[in-house]
Amino acid sequence: MAKSKNQLAIILITTLFFLWGFVLNLNPILIPHLKKACQLSDLQSALIDSASYIAYFLMALPAGLFMKRFGYKSGITLGLVLFAFGTFLFYPAAELRLFSFFLVALFIIASGLTLLETAANPYITVLGDADTATQRLNFAQSFNGLAAFLAPLMGGTFILSGNTLTEQQQQVMSADQLNQYLTNEAASVEVPFVVIGVVVLVVAVFFWRTPLPDITEEAETTDQAEGSIFAEKNLIIGVVAQFFYVGAQVCISSFFIRFSDRVAGINEKTAALYLSVALLGFMIGRFFGTYLMRFVAPPRLLAVYSLINVCLLLVAVLAHGLIAVYALIGVEFFMSIMFPTIFALSIRGLGAKTKIGSSLVIMAIAGGAVFPVIMGKVSDLTTMQTAYIVPALCFFVVFYFALRHYKAENVQLAVTH
């Protein structure tokens, strides 16, 4: 009975990975769309991503404290309610065509997602055998990869109009005509986001009414329960590794289209198609990596994948034409397992500190707000192609983390035998 309850919980938690992956990957659609509808500068439109990353950074610790007090199920339910509420706010934001309102809505959505990620990632690792925790988490994260592939395709179909006015066209339009155009553009987000909100609210009700196992992590010793979370060296190194990994991931995707244009002369629409292929590879990589972990220890696989990505990025920096673009597509595949694997290895053995430790790892998502800025500065000073040295250096940090775990496991096996 307990086993079947755990299986139901794993299925339900896996749906959450898809939901937050879908809405987060609508941001690349919202950036050009709201830039048109709200008449924004490039800097203002970049705040769409900033609203999400700031929420993850600010809300991760409160989320961990909330779940330490009320449990995983309550954290998930509250996260879903905030998620739905934020999506519903897109309707009045579009009606008023206020960019600040959109940013508030995005911040609320991301606050809900922070609760979901802080709860779902550790929850699924404790729903079953500890030896297969990393494998379960990678499997659930595979559906996040599926969402990453589907969101831009569906968002492009139902949100983007494909109708962009030049400055000259806007100048010859009357004030009423321009206002009508902007109103129509803004309104296209209303129905999609309301539909997302309804779906999320239904999932929240389902979670609230479904009996799920309430996992309690026991401390191995009294000292472990009462000691400072910052004394957990493995966790802190894991947080740093996750910070660098997320920074690298955002760098790879955010500059992909511009890189394709500069290095291979690929136009914007074709480059977007290449990016979709890359994200498909990311999804396939998650499923393949989950399978591979049945035969290869997660730390070893993480170390190998990190080095492969460093090599592929060096190819992207040094090669020309399509070879460089293909190298970046390959990076998407090999970084697919990294977030869930770093997460699972970071919180291993935390016992009663798991919820708070998880929130610290989630806070590391803030790396996605830092490294693209560094990469952009390097690009301004040199070239876009040279700037891909930045994510390559990030993967060296991930390699160090993986190597540390690999050596520790080898020592443990030697002692055991």
Image (tube, rainbow, N blue to C red):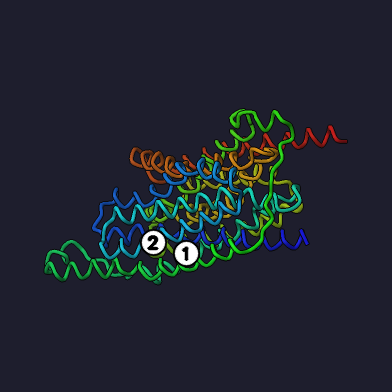
Q: Mark 1 belongs to which amino acid?
A: Ala
Name the residue beneath numbered marker 2.
Answer: 29
Percent x, y for residue 103? 34, 53
Q: Nearer the viewer, residue 66 or 106?
A: 66
Q: Which mark is residue 151?
A: 1
Horizontal arrangement in the rendering, residue 385 relative to residue 355 (left or right) = left
Circle 1 Cα neighbour tier, 10 Å, few/some/many (<14 / 14–19 / ≥20): many
Q: Nearer the viewer, residue 84 or 326?
A: 84
Percent x, y for residue 75? 55, 51
Q: Say if 39 sits above or below 343 in the image.
A: below
Residue in the image at 39% along x and 71% along y: 158
Residue in the image at 59% along x and 47% along y: 70
Q: How many marks?
A: 2
Percent x, y for residue 137? 65, 53
Percent x, y for residue 336? 58, 53
Element type at mark 2? helix
Q: Which mark is residue 191?
A: none
Alpha carbons under labels 2 and 1: distance apart: 9 Å
* Quarter of the picture holding the C terminus: top right
* Quarter of the picture holding the N terminus: bottom right
Element type at mark 1? helix
